[in-house]
Image (cartoon, rainbow, N blue to C red):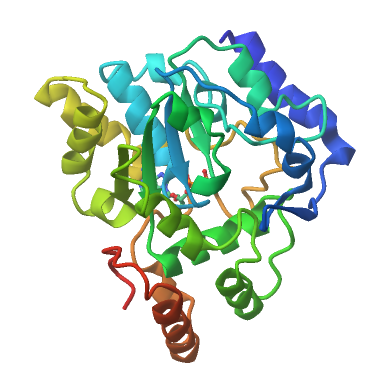
Amino acid sequence: MSEEENLSYKEAIEKAGSSITRFPLIHIRGVPLMCHIANNWDSIWAFCPDPSDLLIATYPKAGTTWTQEIVDLLLHNGDAEACKRAPTPIRSPFLEICSPPPIPSGLDLLKKMDPPRVIKTHLPFQLVPPGFWENKCKAIYVARNAKDNLVSYYYFDLMNKTQPEPGPFDGYINKFMRGELSWGPWYDHVKSYWVEKEKRNILYLFYEDMKENPRREVLRIMKYLDLSVSDEVINQIVELTSFKSMKENPMANYSCIPSPVFDQSVSPFMRKGEVGDWKNHFTPEQAKMFDEDYAEQMKDVNIPFRSLI
Ligand code: PPS
């Protein structure tokens, strides 16, 4: 992708200008999605990947961009310059994203790329185009503990002017618990991939594990992708994908999206990158109420999330 094409992506968003708004959500098979995604649902569902394509799936704000950067660096043997060829959403398109013209959709960007491609999605398992599983594509799922995920999503909804207005934090907790946010319930999302992971050969990762020992998790991703890079390169990748490095990297920090869409003066995309930030936001009463509801909603699975308490 040339510098000119990168610029034109940014320009396209600037041109869309007045049509950028907090889009309403429309349900697809019970899952609330931004109206532009719902209105293009048939072509998204029909997308047929190449068997060599890799899917990175997450509930929003669970560590997608971090994983995209790790994968890109692994695929380029730790070459930092190669991974600065374009911003994240161009290097690794967002499958279902659709915005007002002339902003290219995820499908538009994918059409212009040759496989193997690294494809991002926030779709729950049941809404992932079946071609991914028919073609036995590899898929990495990243899950993040519910309360930190919620806090991160709240700040994102404040700064992302295409997402529904988050409203006060207290009400946002209720919307999260009821599954009313874009891409639907967190609970069903993390479960949907968990129950399919063996059958579909999905690598299921946790944000908290990545924070605890990034080297170990980078090695897991490397092995899953059948790659082999030197110890030195692994160390380099860990360094290049630290929160600090990515926050300063214009090709990874979403500064490519102009402020009418991502207003990073409200909250930066690379906000805190920590485990347990929920403790700075939930009152003890809110945490108690959330945990009781969590126990009920998660009682049918035993996914080893950490940092809930
Ligand atoms: S998105 O919009 O769904 O693609 O967002 P996503 O990338 O999934 O999640 C953004 C949150 O991940 C944090 N982040 C990181 N944490 C640690 N290390 C690295 N390298 C890293 N990169 C991104 C980012 O800061 C968001 O979390 P919060 O808690 O809001 O800071």
Where does residue 10 sit, x and y in percent of width and height? 69, 25
In the image as oriented, which residue stretches furthest toward the bottom? 285
In the displayed structure image, the side of residue 245 where residue 289 appears, left or right: right
Q: Which residue shows up at 79% across the image and 50% down it?
A: 23
Where does residue 28 sit, x and y in percent of width and height? 70, 50
Q: Is residue 269 visible?
A: no
In the image as oriented, which residue stretches furthest toward the right? 18
Q: Which residue shows up at 61% across the image and 25% down it?
A: 47
Where does residue 43 sit, x and y in percent of width and height? 71, 29
In the displayed structure image, the side of residue 143 where residue 220 appears, left or right: left
In the displayed structure image, the side of residue 83 where residue 220 appears, left or right: left
- Quadrant hosting residue 83: top left
Up the image or down, 50 lies above or below 157; here it is above
Up the image or down, 182 lies above or below 238; here it is below
Up the image or down, 120 lies above or below 2; here it is below
Q: Is residue 87 visible?
A: yes
Q: Which residue shows up at 18% across the image and 48% down it?
A: 213
Q: Which residue shows up at 75% across the image and 30% down it?
A: 13
Q: How many marks?
A: 0
Where does residue 269 sit, x and y in percent of width and height? 54, 47
Most foreground residue, 29 or 280? 29
Up the image or down, 61 lies above or below 168; here it is above
Quadrant placement of the N terminus: top right
- Quadrant hosting residue 98: top right
Quadrant placement of the C terminus: bottom left
